[in-house]
Amino acid sequence: MGHGVNQRDLIKMTPEEVDNFLRERRPMTMCTINHDGTIHAVAMWYGFLEGSIAIESKSKAQKIKNLRRDPRMTCLFEAGEYYEELRGVELVGKAEFVEDAERMWPLGVSVFERYYREYTDDARSAIETMLHNRVVVKLIVERTVTWDHRKLGLPSTRPS
């Protein structure tokens, strides 16, 4: 890289690249703040609700308790095994709770389709079970950080 080239700008994803990356099938790491100020990080499946990243969880789960006390959350999505392949998106924001069954339903369908198969009416009972006694959390994004090391054009360090 030449002098004055900001690598941060070179590896930044475009909004379209971010959207495509988030729509790939992958888990995310969701971080909330514990009562003692430490970070609670957990791998989660996610879907989309009203254009936003969202999850469903048991109402009494630690992450939900944390978010009810402090709605700040960070979600990390990543891919790549070697430095020159690393890609990721970090979304920082606040939780919006969705507890109305009618509003929760589209998230249930989204998660089902992302991780199982296309939704058909025979899947209705599975989604109803998934959402029973659950709460949905929608991420209201305040900051996005992205990286795609493939844009650096580095030689592969993958073993032959």
Image (cartoon, rainbow, N blue to C red):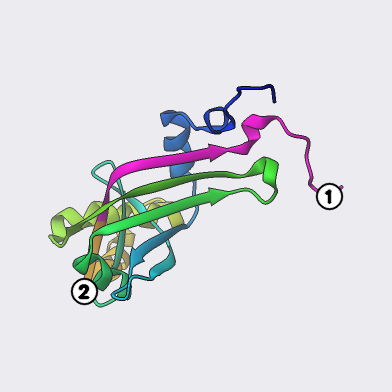
Other-residue count near label 1 (Cα within 10 Å), few / some / many at <14 / 14–19 / ≥20: few
User: Disc 2, disc 1: CB below 8 Å?
Assistant: no
Q: Which residue is mark 1?
A: 159
Q: Residue 51, relative to residue 14: is it above or below?
A: below
**Residue 149 magenta-drawn?**
yes
Residue bearing the label numbered 2:
133
Residue 122 in the image, given as x and y percentages of width and height = 32, 60
Q: Quadrant of residue 104?
A: bottom left
The part of the image, by quadrant, that contains residue 96 is bottom left
- Which residue shows up at 62% across the image and 44% down it? 86
Q: Amino acid at mark 2?
A: Asn
> Quadrant of the rendered structure where residue 124 is?
bottom left
Q: Is residue 58 visible?
A: no
Quarter in which the N terminus is drawn: top right
Q: Secondary structure at mark 2?
A: loop
Q: Give how far apart the Cα atoms at labels 2 and 1 are.
A: 47 Å
**Identity, as a three-letter code, of the amino acid under mark 1:** Pro
Front in this rendered view, residue 106 or 2: 2
Q: Which residues are magenta?
A: 138-160
**Residue 113, x across and y down, in percent:** 39, 52
Q: Is residue 12 visible?
A: yes
x and y percent of residue 33 in the render? 32, 67
Residue under the point 43% across and 47% down: 90
The earlier-in-sequence mark between 2 and 1 is: 2
x 44%, y 41%: residue: 145
Horizontal placement of 21 versus 82: left or right? left
Q: Is 74 left, or right, of 71 in this rendering?
A: right
Name which residue lies at 29% across and 43% down. 142
The x and y percentages for residue 127 are 30, 63
Query: Which callout, 2 or 1, points to the residue nearer the camera?
Result: 1
